[in-house]
Amino acid sequence: MSGGTYLGMPAFPKAAHEAVHNQTLRGNLRHATHTIRAKRAKAVAEVSDWAELREAGKQIKDHTLRHLDRYLVQLEESVTAAGGTVHWAADADEANRIVTYLVKATGESEVVKVKSMATQEIGLNEALEAEGIHAYETDLAELIVQLGKDRPSHILVPAIHRNRGEIRDIFAREMSEWGRPAPEGLTDTPAELADAARLHLREKFLRAKVGVSGANFMVAETGTLVVVESEGNGRMCLTLPETLISVVGIEKIVPTWQDLEVFLQTLPRSSTAERMNPYTSTWTGTTDEDGPQDFHLVLIDNGRTDTLADEVGRQALRCIRCSACLNVCPVYERAGGHAYGSVYPGPIGAILSPQLRGTQSEIDASLPYASSLCGACYDVCPVAIDIPEVLVHLRERVVQGGTVTREGAKVVLKPAKGHAAERAAMRAARWAFSHPGALRTGQRVASRTRRFHPRTLPGPGKAWSETRSLPAVPAEPFRDWWQRTRSGQRPQDGPQGGPQGGPPGGLPGGKDTSK
Amino acid sequence: MSGSRDLILARVRRALADVPPDDTPYDQAFARPYLREHGHRSVAGTVDLLAENLADYRALVHRCAAGELAATIARLLDERGSTAVSVPTGLDPGWLAATEVAQVPDSAANTPDELDRVDSVVTACAVAIAETGTIVLDGSPDQGRRRITLVPDHHICVVRVPDQVVTSVPQGLERLDPARPLTWISGPSATSDIELDRVEGVHGPRTLEVVLVSGE
Ligand code: SF4
């Protein structure tokens, strides 16, 4: 799965429908998102200059993206000067080939990994496995996901869809297959489960010769990489092995060391709602007799330059993956991360995945509709990405086609009208609108949408609204509009999960879609 | 193996073709209207804030005068029941003058497995940040290699107050050298991965004790 698409992934509305009917998932997600949401608001309220930090974060990232070529070259020079080796990968396949080659060169057949969305995006674990190299995930949540033969459902808390009883069962059943078994009589208290993971993984850390990581930031000026984490597994992977391979998207650059003063304040408060996360590691090339003596940085494009070419969509590249937008999203809360069919779930996934991968598949065409446009995601985003604006832009793209950049070349997309992609998109739209709870939570629906529609629907977009009988300017909340235009049929009475509801039952995550 | 370097750089330049040229130097490209620190407090107040925030993230905080440091460290090791303590090569030997616990000097030759059998580690730090309750290690001789504060389950970190304490993250970064490998520590390792219950200690030291030592 080189592009990171989960093959056989049902389009958003169907997957979302299945998820909505999974009680455990719903309960866990609700508890989780509401807990983090409240804590985040408190952590943000502690700093009086939040608005200024957010604006500075946005501007630093915009400045960097605007001069990305220059900063990439500078980064390469500084990393090299500090003793590291820089590799460039245009796409997932190339990145996987490079990492595989580097691991093989060490003669090792296993690596320890710290959670990295970039390596998930490129499907690195599967690529390594195909070459006989085993990659061990070491985040507690990733371990739960990997042992449960599952997929992550949240950027920050990937196992948010599992409750403690399920985790206990997975540990008791699977740990022995991979190494040190779970202790006899393991109960489901979080402390015992964490301890079982500590023991199981410690054995792997102590013998590991190769570590694989991502990075939250790369400093062009100094060549420094930064990993922000909680558990200490990151530190293990970054310091115990002899060889370290970091796979990082080209958009993760900041120009200077000083710029970290913004993000090291906004990221922890936005993501885990802490003043500071337990551990942050920074390293610059290699250090004699401390940590890995062989350091490789693999810079990946994989759709990022295509995203950069889109004047509206490029702001998605400012994302620092804090996951605040997931936790406030009423659609995510009900649908769960798996419904997005991508390593990037929630609002950010809805704008990033279709840009990184194109909107040709059903799932990617439907993602821009996986939103009620309530704007809560924009309000919490620490780099002020206007997610609703990008969503509306991408919807327009799906419907009316247009010029986009794919693998560096301009291509003209045909309107999706009448195609499978459009039908999937429309189902997603109906799904979002027919879940009144999802919309009720976002009380700012009306003001947000009014801002966008006059700008997007006239012109070629009109064809869509005419043939589909959609109002051009819903000057009322979507929720009200939907209820009204469904001619008296209250959403609760409608077919559950939208007209195209899939079969209830198992999570898509229950299937093994890793190949 | 950097075959795609020029390809990616060319794609970036093409992608930005719509952006008007702009030669504004970096330091004039945007403003930094945010604060250098939050609130105003006395030096003692800043140290108190550090202690408070460290404790809030469940580090165990102790305060003592310089003359009591050796006894304090000895007591903490004793209470822990440690039989071996890892020691950075540049640590002030006086700090461990009162303890009988076997000392394992930090050395490149130690294997991770050997380190795993060490109970505790005692280090100094590079800087401490009050607003976030963070201590930062930079691998100086009195702090040692990164792994000695990672593998043992009990870390005692000594902060010289008020000299090593800054108020904010921006001030902390100013004092640090990016060329050194840094570890920022805010409380013991933790996870919230199981139903969002915060559990102390997954892989790093599960007990973090911070000694705020004043005077010389
Ligand atoms: S889009 Fe914004 S809020 Fe969402 S993960 Fe990215 S930085 Fe965080």
Image (spheres, rainbow, N blue to C red):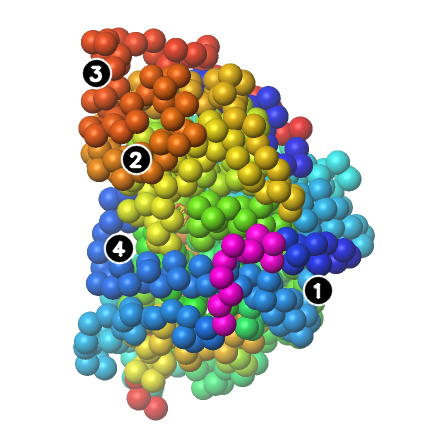
User: Which residue is disc 3 drawn over?
Assistant: A484
Q: Are marks 3 and 4 on the same chain?
A: yes
Q: Which mark is residue A44?
A: 4
Q: Which mark is residue A454?
A: 2
The residues colored magenta run B12-23
* Spot occupied by residue A375 in the image (x, y as percentages of width and height): 29, 40
Residue at disc 1, secondary structure? strand
Label 2 environment density (alpha carbons within 10 Å; few <14, some 14–19, many ≥20): few
Q: Nearer the viewer, mark 3 or mark 4?
A: 3
Q: Nearer the viewer, mark 2 or mark 3?
A: 2
* Spot occupied by residue A265 in the image (x, y as percentages of width and height): 35, 62
Sequence-earlier tag: 2 or 3 = 2
Q: Which quarter of the image is occupied by the C terminus of chain A?
A: top right
Whole-number angstrom distance, CA of label 4 to CA of label 2: 33 Å
Label 4 environment density (alpha carbons within 10 Å; few <14, some 14–19, many ≥20): many
Q: Quadrant of residue A477?
A: top left
Asked if the beta carbon under badge 1 is closer than 8 A to the nearest atom of ligand 1, the reply is no
Residue at disc 3, secondary structure? helix
Where B9 falls versus B157 (above or below)? above
Decide: marks 3, 4 in contact (CB < 8 A)? Answer: no
Q: Which chain does tag 1 point to?
A: A
Q: Is residue A27 left or right of residue B80?
A: left
Label 1 environment density (alpha carbons within 10 Å; few <14, some 14–19, many ≥20): some
Sequence-earlier tag: 4 or 2 = 4
Where A47 falls versus B108 (above or below)? above
Q: Are marks 1 and 3 on the same chain?
A: yes
**Mark 1 is on which residue type?**
Thr
